[in-house]
Image (cartoon, rainbow, N blue to C red):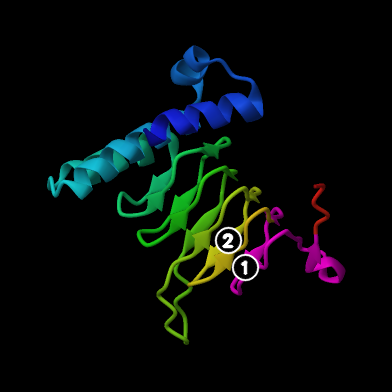
């Protein structure tokens, strides 16, 4: 079950007990409501997916579209202001911080596609990932970065123009 993978990954990364995570972790609450609404959507049960996602918007200020595809093993840190659009795909072991937006680019080029975030990525506070881009596995997207192009695997993207994309050393 994907929600159990979320709990396991949270315990692995943060050391939280399962009970404390269930009682007090906002990110886990948001993921639980998303997973329930996505399940109802897959079974074509009308209206309830929308209601559950709106509850999380009101309580926590997090907007995860019930049509997005989030694999198990996701962590949401703080969460307030997090937006995940309807066509977004997020693989396992991804950590998302507050004020992150993953959605369409729009504008003049009419890019209405959505991003794919591959395994083991971290997306820091305020980052915006817009359009049909892929964030390669093992990548880090720094705080307040705007991504509109594909990011290769093992990359670190920062707002420092000298370090726009640099290879991250992976220990074998």
| 70 vs 148, nearest the viewer | 70
Label whose residue precedes the other's in the sequence (1 or 2): 2
Label 2: element kind: strand
Residue 62, given in percent of the width and then of the height, sits at 43, 43
Q: Residue furthest bottom?
A: 108
Q: Look at the image and say whether residue 98 sits in the magenta stretch.
A: no
Disc 2 crowd rating (10 Å Cα; few below 14, some 14-19, many 20+) is many
Residue drawn where x is 48% and y is 13% of the image: 19
| 104 vs 93, nearest the viewer | 93
Left or right of 161 in this view: 44: left
Q: Which residue in the structure is indicated by mark 2?
A: 128
Residue drawn where x is 81% and y is 65% of the image: 166
Residue 54 occupies quadrant: top left
Q: Look at the image and say whether residue 161 sits in the magenta stretch.
A: yes
Residue 144, given in percent of the width and then of the height, sits at 67, 57
Label 1: element kind: strand
Asked whether the residues under the numbered discs 1 and 2 touch, taking CB atoms below 8 Å apart as contact, a structural biologist would say yes
Q: Which residue in the structure is indicated by mark 1?
A: 147
Disc 1 crowd rating (10 Å Cα; few below 14, some 14-19, many 20+) is many
Q: Residue furthest front?
A: 172
Segment colored magenta: 140-167
- Classify 133 as above or below 77: below
Residue 148, given in percent of the width and then of the height, sits at 59, 73
Left or right of 138 in this view: 71: left
Mark 1–mark 2 distance (CA, rounded to whole Å):
6 Å
Report whether residue 55 is seen: no
Residue drawn where x is 47% and y is 86% of the image: 109
| 159 vs 122, nearest the viewer | 122
């Amino acid at each position: 079950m994907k929600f159990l993978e979320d709990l396991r990954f949270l315990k692995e990364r943060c050391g939280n007990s399962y009970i404390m995570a269930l009682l007090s972790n906002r990110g886990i609450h948001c993921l639980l409501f998303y997973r329930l609404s996505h399940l109802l959507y897959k079974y074509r049960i009308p209206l309830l997916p929308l209601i559950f996602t709106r509850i999380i918007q009101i309580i926590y200020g997090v907007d995860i579209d019930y049509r997005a595809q989030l694999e198990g093993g996701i962590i949401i840190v703080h969460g307030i202001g997090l937006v995940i659009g309807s066509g977004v795909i997020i693989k396992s072991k991804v950590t998302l911080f507050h004020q992150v937006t993953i959605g369409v680019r729009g504008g003049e080029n009419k890019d209405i596609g959505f991003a794919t975030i591959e395994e083991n990525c971290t997306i820091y506070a305020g980052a915006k990932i817009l359009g049909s881009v892929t964030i390669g596995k093992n990548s880090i997207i720094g705080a307040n970065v705007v991504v509109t192009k594909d990011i290769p695997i093992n990359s670190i993207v920062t707002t420092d123009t000298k370090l726009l994309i640099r290879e991250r050393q992976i220990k074998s």
